[in-house]
Amino acid sequence: MFKLDERYLKNLEEFLDKKIQLRERENKIEIYADAEIQFILRKKSENSYVFQTIERGQILIEYEYNNLSEENMKRILAINLKGLFGESVDYSKAVNFKNISLKDLEKSMNDLVGREYYSINHAEVLRINLEQLENGGFDIYLLLSDGERINLAENIHSFSRFYNEAVTLKEDLNRVTIYQEIFNDKLVNSEIEEILFKGIN
């Protein structure tokens, strides 16, 4: 049976900064946000899981995770719930990047996001990379430590998406940092990448 132990649940409530209501069934955990919204994590097989967000009986979001250890699935569950229970990411400043020049882009990104979350025309691991194309457009991608490139947008001509992706990465990594502190679970880059970017179908 797939269960969450008492220590994990205590840490989870501290991480989410709220009491949680849940029901554990055979290979399934149901977590209730309120009377209308619930989250379900179901173990399909040894290393396969399904995570669902359900509102009023309708599935809004469904992710399937394959080739994933139970330990990493519990990490992903906590970090997913932090995003779902927490405040939404603020993308309101993206409008400032619609018509900005490449020359002014770096200063604005430094001021509003931080240099450690992005790179321009120089591929860096675990950052949102912007690469200029010969036709004047830009590709946006995330580079993982094993060399895998996750393409996020191709041939764009506005930098709003670049800003949004960098802000999302910043928030995701911040949640991972808080998770490590509360759960006393030190993660290396490859583990962080698996939690945030891999294993989802």
Image (spheres, rainbow, N blue to C red):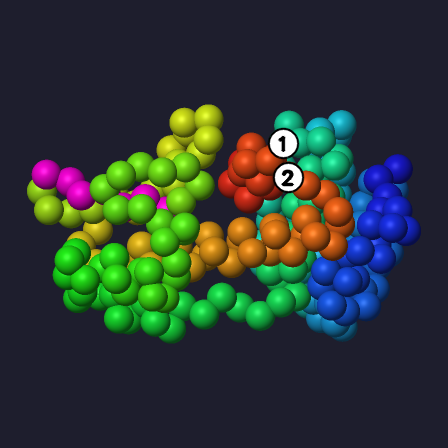
Q: Can you see residue 41?
A: no
Element at label 2: loop
Residue 66: image tag: 1
Q: Residue at x 26, y 62 (%)?
A: 107
Task: Report whether 11 appears left or right of 120.
Answer: right
Task: Report whether 166 appears left or right of 14.
Answer: left
Q: Residue at x 31, y 46 (%)?
A: 119
Picture quarter containing residue 199?
Answer: top right
Q: Residue at x 77, y 57 (%)?
A: 12
For residue 62, above or below residue 123? below
Residue 187: image tag: 2
Task: Report whether 86 appears left or right of 1.
Answer: left
The span shown in magenta is 128-134
Residue 134: image tag: none
Q: Residue at x 76, y 27 (%)?
A: 46
Q: Position of residue 69 (x, y in %)?
A: 71, 31
